[in-house]
C-alpha cells in the first residue's frame, strides 16, 4: 500500500487531496497545526476507506521544520 504525505491537510486543497487519495486506498500522513481538524479528518477517512492515517502537528514556518517532519516520519515508519 502506498503512503502519501500531505502538508496543509487540515483544510482547503490539502484536505481535498487527502480525500481523493484515501478513496484510492492510499495511506496518509497528514500535517498541519490544527490538531482537532486533522484528527477529525483522519478518523473520517480511516473509517470510510479502511486506510491507515497518521497526523503530525508541525508549524512549517519554524526553522528546521522540514528536518523535524522528516525525522518524525522516519521514526514512525522506519523509512
Ligand atoms: N484552493 C485552491 O483552489 C488553490 C488553488 C491553487 C493554489 N492554491 C494554493 O494552495 C495553498 C493552500 O490553499 P487553500 O485554499 O487550501 O488554503 P487553506 O484552506 O487556508 O489551507 C491551508 C492549509 O495550510 C495549513 N497551514 C497554514 N499555515 C501553516 C503553517 N505555518 N504550518 C503548517 N501548516 C500550515 C493550514 O492548516 P493549519 O492552520 O491547521 O496549520 C491548512 O491546512 C495556498 O498557497 C493557495 O494559494 C490553492
Image (tube, rainbow, N blue to C red):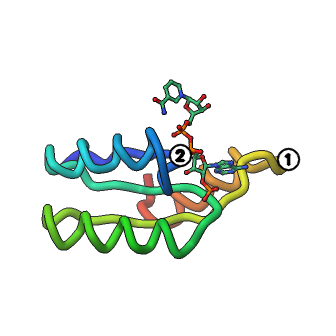
Q: Where ligand 1 lies, by image quadrant?
A: top right
For the residue labelled by badge 1, is the local secondary structure a helix, a strand or a loop? loop
Which residue sits at x=52%, y=57%?
A: 73
Q: Which residue is mark 2?
A: 7
x%, y% of residue 67?
70, 48
User: How many other residues sit within 10 Å of disc 1, few (<14), some (14-19) or many (≥20)?
Assistant: few
| Along the line of sight, the residue nearer the viewer: 5 or 73 | 5
Indicate if the residue with disc 2 has its beta carbon within 8 Å of ligand 1. yes
x%, y% of residue 23?
15, 49
Which residue sits at x=60%, y=50%?
A: 70
Q: CA distance from mark 1 to mark 2?
A: 16 Å
**Which quadrant of the figure has residue 68?**
bottom right
8 to the left or right of 64: left
Closer to the N terminus: mark 1 or mark 2? 2
Residue 34, compared with residue 25, is above or below; it is: below
Question: Are discs 1 and 2 less than 8 Å apart at CB?
Answer: no
x%, y% of residue 30?
46, 56
User: How many other residues sit within 10 Å of disc 2, few (<14), some (14-19) or many (≥20)?
Assistant: some
Residue 22, compared with residue 14, is above or below; it is: below
x%, y% of residue 24?
14, 44
Outermost residue toward the right? 63
Outermost residue toward the front? 12
Q: Nearer the viewer, mark 1 or mark 2?
A: 2
Q: Which residue is mark 1?
A: 63
Amino acid at each position: 500500500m502506498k503512503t502519501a504525505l500531505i502538508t496543509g491537510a487540515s483544510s482547503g486543497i490539502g484536505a481535498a487531496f487527502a480525500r481523493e487519495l484515501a478513496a484510492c486506498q492510499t495511506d496518509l500522513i497528514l500535517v498541519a497545526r490544527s490538531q482537532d481538524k486533522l484528527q477529525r479528518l483522519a478518523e473520517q477517512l480511516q473509517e470510510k476507506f479502511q486506510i491507515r492515517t497518521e497526523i503530525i502537528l508541525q508549524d512549517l514556518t519554524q526553522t528546521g521544520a522540514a528536518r523535524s517532519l522528516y525525522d518524525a516520519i522516519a521514526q514512525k515508519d522506519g523509512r
